[in-house]
Amino acid sequence: MNLTPLIASFLVFYGLYLILSLSLNLEYGYAGQPNFGKVFFYSVGAYTAGAVTAHTLRWASFGPMGEALGLPPVADICSAAAAVVREQLAAAHPGLMAVIFLTSLVLAALLGAAAGYLLSYPALRVREVYLAMVLLIVAEISRSYVRANSAIACGAHGLVGVPNPLLWIDDPGVRGYAYAAAVLAVAGIVYVVAQRLGNSPFGRVLKAVRDDELAAQVLGKRVARIKGQVMAIGSGMAAVAGVLYAFHVQFVGAEDFIPVITFNVLAMVILGGAANHKGVALGALILTAVDRMSRTSFLALFGLQPPFDVNYLRYVIIGALLVVLIMFRPQGLLPEGPVRTPAVEVFQRRGSA
Amino acid sequence: MALLEVRGLHKDFGGAAAVAGVDFTLEAGALVGLIGPNGSGKTTLFNLLSGVLRPTRGEIYFDGQRIDGLSPDRIFRLGLVRTFQVPRLFRHMTTLENALLPPEDQLGESPWHALWPKRWRQQELALAHKARAVLETFRLDHAALQGTTELSGGQMKLLEAARALMGRARLLLFDEPAAGVAPALARSVFDHLRRLQRETGMTLLVIEHRLDVLFEYVDDAIVMDRGCIIARGKPAELARDPRVIAAYFGGGDGQHAGEPGGAAGSGVTAMG
Amino acid sequence: MEFLAELAAPLLTGLLHGSLFTLMAVGLTMTFSVTRMINFAHAELVTLGAYAAVVAVNNYGWSLGPAMAAAVLIGLAAAVLVDELVYKPLTAMRAPDLYLMVASIGVSMVLRHIIYIFADLNGLLNVKARVLNNPVMFVGYGTVTTVHLWAVPAALLLALALHLFLTQSLTGKVMRAVADNVMLAQASAAPVARIRRLAWIAAGSLAGLAGAVWAVYSPVTPSVGWGLLPRMFASAIIGGLVSFSGTFIGAYVVGFAENLGIFLANYFLGTPLDYRGIITFLIVAVMLLWRPAGVLAARGGGRW
């Protein structure tokens, strides 16, 4: 019974969902902007990773690297033959893959942030509920468009063969854990960033916009700019997660980016406790566990073979959880705490100035 | 040159005029009262001055600069600050956090700088000290780390006022700063405001229904009724002015067209 | 001439879709105007109706009439049940609109995937009601079928019935009053609870019926309602979510845009036919951002 792939996969997905839920926590938990288009920004990262990898390796296949391995130059990026070529190049050139990996991360962060900033425009025009719907729709428009248009992710079939940057590691077990470590490292950085942003005057301003936008404006805060900033930051983070996802599943396709992913992340934020990053980390852990355990492969370990597709059960659970939380515990598991800045020290030292 | 100059200000709401032609000036350093029966347009006037509402007609000049039509945050940064009649505190934040929000040019408010706490730590501590001083004046320092939902109604009003004093305001518009506050504390709030005015040269325009308290502190008061200014002068004169008396105690008190939500009760109306 | 012949098919499909979207979207408009909530689970009311009809006809051998009645009843029951269990309590708790919408998303997920499980267990993942949808007439390259003959008159009848109900009947007028201003209506002791119940009954029944007809017209999956939801929203939002005449117009705008519009765009501009889904989403996005009150800019709620 080889548990390694399951454990490594769990760790990777926890890292991804942690990043996604922290980003939504900043946008919605702190700033009150329900970014229900979260999966769109996730997809931006994945498409970026796919494009960078496919085009770079195509270029490599024409040059000395390709020749050295006796590989044919890639004609059509979307073909199965191209996927094979990419895999072989990746296994032989760790350095190149590292460059591709890092470039994807940086480029995705920038593109995601730009998209987030642009899509903060609806946040200035419409109320919460309509903003949520507009962003949800943007994600769906994107999915329809990418599926119909081959240029971005090879249309309906998707881009197969986005080689993991650690493919040069022969042992799949070691490779799995190594990649999980990389993902968790990035997630750790995002966590620190989210905590610092939350426990700062910026975090204070986000909460003010959430609690009473007009009062915040009357007290001198540039609400439009703040909304743009938080959407840019959150979307950049989501895109980074998208890159990590693409290299894990080694595939990029529009059909992966469906609305239930956004709702899953939303459930993590609500479950954990909005505006509490620790809580959200806990919520993400619980729901990643639900996500990973409600799989045929996991249940088979225990000899369980449900007569129906187990994926359906997962969504029943998430949906029910959303309803129950909203009805009985919208504040989540861990309550929202104050923004912890050094200012608090002045009030804790009794008497001294 | 007057600090604030208002000319021909009108605000219509679907046919009803909440503010129907207001002209007045405020000199720098003055402490002026704004009185009038409910529904006379006082809060709407504040909304117009602070940029929350756009005038239907008319102009507002602050320190020579035209401000009608500017966004509220811009007007705040120019030095014009207002409070709300029903406090608009940030519910999910503590007293201290509320007080720390208004100061301008906080380095930590930029997301990039926020990532490096050392850069804004000094400024934050300095602001915290200022907040402590202000909160002490309003007897709120012990509640600094409590959530605003735990404050009493009077304390919320005081925090609303304290918060307004955390910026670099040159003109402060106070909407009933002492309503619902115990009389002794109300007096001390006014004492503090007057002291501030004398020390810093701040200008204050205060809406207040308790005329006895107000008249002790202001040299000059503007009286509004039905969206217009009907009188202005020293408290003693106004108390004898028949138009003022008629507006307050004459027929039909409280039934005035125009001011949204301003119709009933004494100042504890739901503000939009 | 050739062009006109080709035009007939998308035109007829647009007409059919528009009629069915009317049945589906009126429910959304009705519940929104009375409760002010956006109900994602409305999609599943259509799915339930479709599956009720399929199971009744295919598995139990019922004829179409009773099967449709079953669909209506099931849609109705589900709508009222969900309102009683989830939406009403949340409204009583003064939950913000966003919470109600999120709850409806949760309900939708739960219902849809329970139907998936049921369908998976019974081999009904992709089915059509075994009722013949016969061609009645050929127009150019298009076909008028029996479903056309039910759907289009049904939509028109519905429009007429709604108009009469809202303008002539007392209950209808009270419903309009409630839709205009819920708080005011409550203060004047209008039977708000009864109106609310009525709105859900109507929404569930119409959605169930529409689902049943759809199952005769086309194969259905447990996601059929969810896939049609953007069309329902687009139709309703053209009426600002509160105007029935706007919804009626909207349903046909959406039906024709998706069929006729894409055909024309493809014919004259070479737009790929795959983009048809995007049209609906664009309609919703554009309306939400720039004309949330609808194209008729309805002055009140629940009005004809």
Image (cartoon, rainbow, N blue to C red):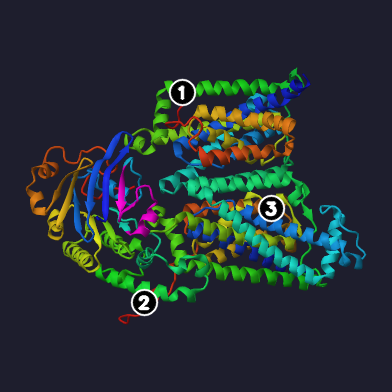
Query: Does mark 2 fall on the same chain as mark 1?
Result: no
Judged left or right of residue B144, residue A163 is: right
As drawn, which residue projects farthest toward the bottom? A352
Residue at numbered disc 3: A311
Residue B73 shown in magenta: yes
Foreground tag (2 vs 3) = 2
Q: Nearer the viewer, residue C240 or C137?
A: C240
Q: Secondary structure at mark 2?
A: helix
Q: Secondary structure at mark 3?
A: helix
Q: Quadrant of the C terminus of chain A?
A: bottom left
Q: Amino acid at mark 1?
A: Phe
Q: Nearer the viewer, residue B128 or C128?
A: B128
Q: Is residue C110 visible?
A: no
Residue at numbered disc 1: C165
Measured Cα–Cα span from mark 3 to mark 1: 45 Å
Q: Nearer the viewer, residue B1 or B37?
A: B1
Judged left or right of residue A125, residue C14 is: right
Q: Amino acid at mark 3?
A: Asn
Q: What's the residue at 88%, 67% (across, down)?
A: A64
As drawn, which residue projects farthest toward the right? A70
Q: What's the residue at 65%, 43% (across, down)?
A: C115
Q: Residue under mark 1: which chain is it in?
A: C
As drawn, which residue projects farthest toward the left? B240
Measured Cα–Cα span from mark 2 to mark 3: 52 Å
Q: In the image, which residues are magenta?
A: B58-79
In the rendered view, tell whether residue C25 sits above or below residue C83: above
